[in-house]
Amino acid sequence: MDLRSVGLGVSVAFAWLTTGFACGEHAIAADDAAERDGSPDDNVVDMETDGAPEAVADVDAETDGDGGGDAGAGSLTVTILASPGSWGVSWRVRADWEWAPVEGALVAFDLPDGERRELTAAADGRVTFRDFDWLPGAEAAVTAWADGFGLASAVGIGPESSPVLLLPTLGDPSAEGVEVSGTFQNFTDMMNSFLLTSRDCGGLFWGGIDWTFMVPPGTAAELIGFEILPASRPDGGRENTILGWLVQEVGPFTEPAVVDLDFAGGASTTRVSGSFRLPARMDSPLRELVPGCSAVLVHRPNPGAVFTPIVKGVFGFATTIARRIDGAGWDYELEYVTGLDTTAASTWFELHGNGDEYSALVLPGPPAGGTLDCEFIEPASLVRPADPSRPHPLHEQITWTSARSDVTPVVAILDGPACLWWVEGPPGATSLTVPRTPSAPGARAVLGAEARSARVELQALDGDGECIVAHASTDTFLLVAP
């Protein structure tokens, strides 16, 4: 059964099953505040890069950003950090993940005049490109890659930019974990659905009474589970009967183990109610999408200005989502477990289609109920490729239309649930061209020769309001490398 049948929508699933990273070009890495003595030769190192020319990586913490009128006076500092990896439902985030700098990352800079330069990141993950001209009205792009990682790009950047690129970690991170399995005890009916997540190590099980789960080796993990009987409403909403909760610590384990999880102990829960509205425009595509809402625990937000929080576990679900009498929105009731550390909690509201199309709002903190005033973003409407089922050349322009101009577009290129390449465009853009990869053979091998699925996301932060982030996605389409 699809998780959307219980109101756990596409965006939450993507946050589990993809890296959930983004390249926030206006973000500043955590150690940017560190003082440096400012001497001109500090932190300038010579490096060699496999597949790239010898380069000088100037990693001053400051970014000049001077697009001044002097010839060759331009500069651009790029920061490269590591994002967690993903692969299927065994995905998890290391509890101590710190978005570490990627030393040795190869960074390609496509200059406004068409020239390309490459530098290698130093220990703090930074490179600075100098001595070029910011041509009036021209834009540039940067793309980063490192061994063991995917790719990240920021395109359409200008003199005021300070890109922070977050590289997706490739491979299966569950290989570092220990498999724990067992059978649920004291449930109501084995024909119901069961979901198991974790408070602190990520991961997801959805199925019957026999379960498996990956936990970090040598570390105890607190698991959260529930038994649910989902049903659809005639108005397109949801009616979920939650028949039992459990919160149980397991481990620590260093090798595979068998554990029985028992619903007899139960868990303390509470319910809240509220509503969220749909756009007033009657022809808005959001009015045709299916609603969902849930309470989740997230990993610490990444340092990007645009991001999708990375889900560690679900601790609350909608029991009822019903269309309002006036048809302008949805009323909901949501039940969630209390007594947990919810400093990393958020509440997700979502509208989703039959495929991967969705629009979501993410609020800080555990569910509070009441009327939600945040505005959903309408998913982009693809113009090119015109036929999403036919492979579109990787480096040909992707275009779309959007009902809002205050959103930042990103193109995510995927391998199943895992993200291989994240390309961020400038705010308000309605087109984007995926850059060339850096020159190293490993960078060119990330996508391979087969067609890859991709999607266009529109994202917006509401720093002064109550929403952490609003984001929407098209359904997937195909891209193929030349």
Image: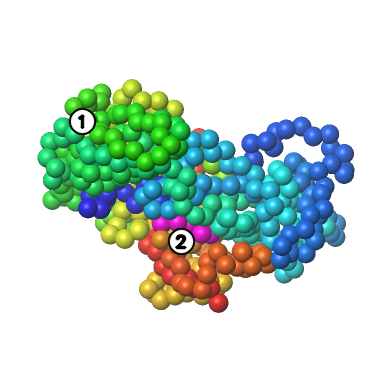
Mark 2 lies on a secondary structure that is strand
Assess whether residue 64 is covered by the magenta stretch.
no
What residue did someone put label 2 on?
Answer: 414
Assess whether residue 418 is covered by the magenta stretch.
yes
Residue 289 placed where, x, y %? 28, 54
Q: Amino acid at mark 1?
A: Phe
Considering depth in this image, is 83 or 356 the residue closer to the camera? 83
Q: Residue at x 68, y 36 (%)?
A: 31
What residue did someone put label 1 on?
Answer: 263
Mark 1 lies on a secondary structure that is helix
Q: Residue at x 78, y 43 (%)?
A: 60
Instruction: Give the quadrant of the C terminus.
Output: bottom right
Residue 100 seen anywhere in this rendered image of the structure: yes
- Is 466 drawn above or below residue 292 in the view shown? above
Q: Residue at x 20, y 42 (%)?
A: 209
Q: Amino acid at mark 2?
A: Leu
Left or right: residue 30 versus residue 1 is: right
Considering depth in this image, is 323 or 12 the residue closer to the camera? 12
Q: Residue at x 14, y 42 (%)?
A: 190
Residue 164 placed where, x, y %? 63, 48
Residue range in magenta is: 417-421
